[in-house]
Amino acid sequence: MRPETRPGHDAERRRVVGRVLDSGPFALRLEAPGFPAHAPGQFAMLQLDPGLERVDPLLPRPMAVYRREGDALEFRFRPVGRGTRIMGSLAPGEAVAVVGPLGRGFRLPEGAALLVGGGTGIASLYELARDSSGPLRVALGAATQAELLGLEDFRALDCELSVSTEDGSAGRKGRVTDGLGIRPGESVYACGPNGMLRAVAALAEEARAPCSVSLESTMACGFGICLGCVVPVRDGFRYLCTQGPVLDAGELCWEDLP
Ligand SMILES: Cc1cc2nc3c(=O)[nH]c(=O)nc-3n(C[C@H](O)[C@H](O)[C@H](O)COP(=O)(O)OP(=O)(O)OC[C@H]3O[C@@H](n4cnc5c(N)ncnc54)[C@H](O)[C@@H]3O)c2cc1C
Ligand code: FES
């Protein structure tokens, strides 16, 4: 199934130039007036603006919108390579091209919800947690305490929060899915590495709970052109950039995902 987008037109229409308010190794905040309203879990492609001072040949990098407050757009990330390191070292006032919001985000829960975030996937869940109105449980896990993106923000929410780290530096030592149970009536929302999502999807299937997962693949274009983000589903495949990144866990062919 081809995505119904007009890449060139859409990229230009959804592109704004943000100015850096502050940045650090795990966070970037931009003043981005004109960035359209978005749903929790949608993402943007970030690139240093080639028309402005700092020229960089990098492909744009997909990043979940962590939080928007007025014109301030915030991203949380783990520095894993060149792009994320540059993003964390920008000076106030520098320009970043932001194309978005892209993809399909999460629908707000209508009842009780369990949110499960692993590693950088935590960043896709903050606004979903903040905007949920029913009973809410949040389980966050990462390799180390430093990688629990936005932990203080989650602590400030009205939710039952559990935290785990693989090295035991915060919360329980182990994986976020260890001992995780799904309560009757809960809907499940998850973002993280595929192994974690596979485990969450299996728990949800066992509990017969609805489960939405957001996948973080590599993405070169964000507009359905490069095929870099295609994932297998029961009736064919989906482009994560235009038909995801949030998909129903039940439609994915988990056995064929890396
Ligand atoms: C929809 C979406 C939303 C995302 N949101 C966030 C977010 O909010 N915060 C965040 O930290 N990251 C997020 N990511 C992942 C992020 O895009 C990558 O970490 C980033 O592009 C890496 O760029 P780099 O230049 O720093 O690393 P590169 O130099 O490109 O790669 C460095 C290392 O990271 C690995 N890598 C690169 N991209 C990914 C990826 N998508 N998943 C897993 N490993 C990868 C590479 O294989 C390599 O080992 C998201 C990805 C998607 C698709
Ligand atoms: S990122 Fe290029 S097709 Fe999805």
Image (spheres, rainbow, N blue to C red):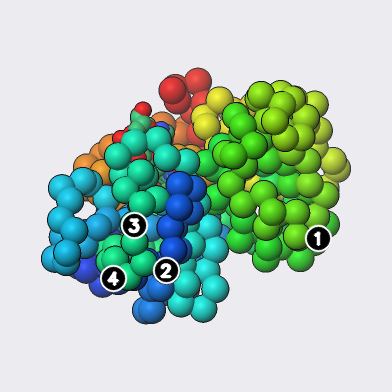
Crowdedness near tag 1: few (<14), some (14–19) or many (≥20) residues, C-alpha within 10 Å: some
Q: Earlier in the sequence, mark 3 or mark 2?
A: 2
Local secondary structure at mark 2:
strand
Tell me where residue 108 appears, x and y as whole percent: 65, 61
Q: CA distance from mark 4 to mark 3?
A: 14 Å
Residue at the spot 38% in from the left edge and 73% down from the top edge: 32
- Disc 1 C-beta below 8 A from ligand 1: no
Q: Amino acid at mark 1?
A: Asp
184 relative position to 66: left or right: right
Q: Earlier in the sequence, mark 2 or mark 1?
A: 2
Q: Which residue is mark 2?
A: 21
Q: CA distance from mark 3 to mark 2?
A: 9 Å
Q: Earlier in the sequence, mark 4 or mark 3?
A: 4
Q: Which residue is mark 4?
A: 17
Q: Say if mark 2 contacts mark 4, CB within 8 Å.
A: no
Residue at the spot 52% in from the left edge and 30% down from the top edge: 194
Residue found at the very far right of the displayed protein: 184
Q: Earlier in the sequence, mark 1 or mark 3?
A: 3
Q: Could you say which is closer to the camera, residue 56 or residue 254?
A: 56
Q: Which residue is mark 1?
A: 158
Q: Could you say which is closer to the camera, residue 90 or residue 18?
A: 90
